[in-house]
Amino acid sequence: MNCPGGTLLYRHGLKSYRDLPIRMGEFGKVHRYEPSGSLHGLLRVRHFTQDDAHIFCAPEQMNEECRSVVALVLDIYRQFGFEEVRIKLSTRPANRIGSDATWDQLEGALIHSLEEMNLVYQVNPGEGAFYGPKLEFVLRDAIGRDWQCGTLQVDMNLPERFGIEYVDEDVGRGYAAARKIAVLTTARPKPHLAHRQVNEEHPEIFKAR
């Protein structure tokens, strides 16, 4: 999980509302102790490198950033010949952090972004991460198998827990929202965090074409 690292980088130095959105990208290594029976060639492994990004933005920037990320992901997949990409919206799980009001705002940002882009999506109730909802981009390989690849997650909980802030226009402090590729407008605003992975689960699926 690379999110805490991006959050610590954001915390290096004071940030202003003029600096947002801040977009960080990396080719990050991921290690997962997958059960031996679930390993599947190059498509389900215990170690891989993912195209990972974290975007820190103010609340009013969240919808636009979500639309930009969705457009980017779909464009990348088109370059590899994937014209039909299924999108799934995974909503709040039973075990989660954050208030219902926060989850309403985060889920609403993803839904509004998809609807403004006239994109069809399927709802997966309760399948979101414990810290925020996510969009899953599902690709079909050359022999008709579906694979969940990229994701876009919005997160207002990590920014609050890590205490990452920015100076708002009224010279107050706010929390940055992070997307695992959102800010709560308060007296001390926090930036939102957006998380984005283009090939999170199956980086080698492109070779199946």
Image (spheres, rainbow, N blue to C red):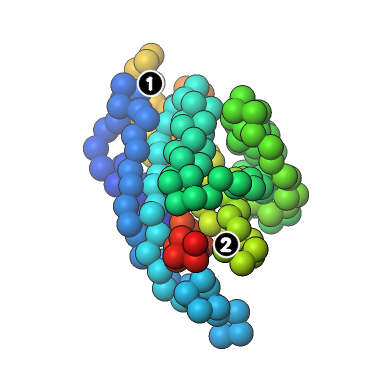
> Secondary structure beneath disc 2?
loop
In which quadrant will I find the N terminus?
bottom left
Please name whichever residue, 17 or 163, is drawn nearer the observer in this view of the structure: 17
Q: Residue at x 58, y 55 (%)?
A: 139
Label 1, on which residue?
168
**Name of the residue lying farthest toward the top:** 170
Q: Is residue 8 visible?
A: no
Residue 75 placement (x, y as % from top left): 46, 40
Say above or below: 51 vs 175.
below
| Horizontal relation, residue 103 to residue 67: left or right | right
Q: Nearer the viewer, mark 1 or mark 2?
A: 2
**x 46%, y 56%: residue:** 199
In the rendered structure, which disc, 1 or 2, sits on the residue that comes first in sequence? Answer: 2
Q: What separation in Å lies between label 1 and label 2 (alpha carbons)?
A: 46 Å
Q: Height in image: 191 above or below 138? A: above
Residue that label 2 marks: 141
Residue 193: % across, % down: 46, 40
Identity of the residue furthest to the bottom in this view:
36
What residue appears at the point 45 percent right and 51 percent down from the top-left corner? 80
**Tag 2: Cα neighbours inside 10 Å, few (<14), some, or many (≥20)?**
some
Amino acid type, callout 1: Asp
Q: Can you give x and y, in whole percent of width and height, for residue 163 in the image? A: 41, 41
Label 1 packing within 10 angstroms: few (<14), some (14-19), many (20+) = many
Q: Residue at x 38, y 54 (%)?
A: 51
| Quarter assignment of residue 189 | top left
| Apparent side of residue 97 relative to residue 17 in the rendered image (left or right) | right
Question: How far from the left and from the top, in percent, is residue 5?
Answer: 35, 54
Q: Nearer the viewer, residue 190 or 154?
A: 154
**Label 2 amino acid?**
Asp
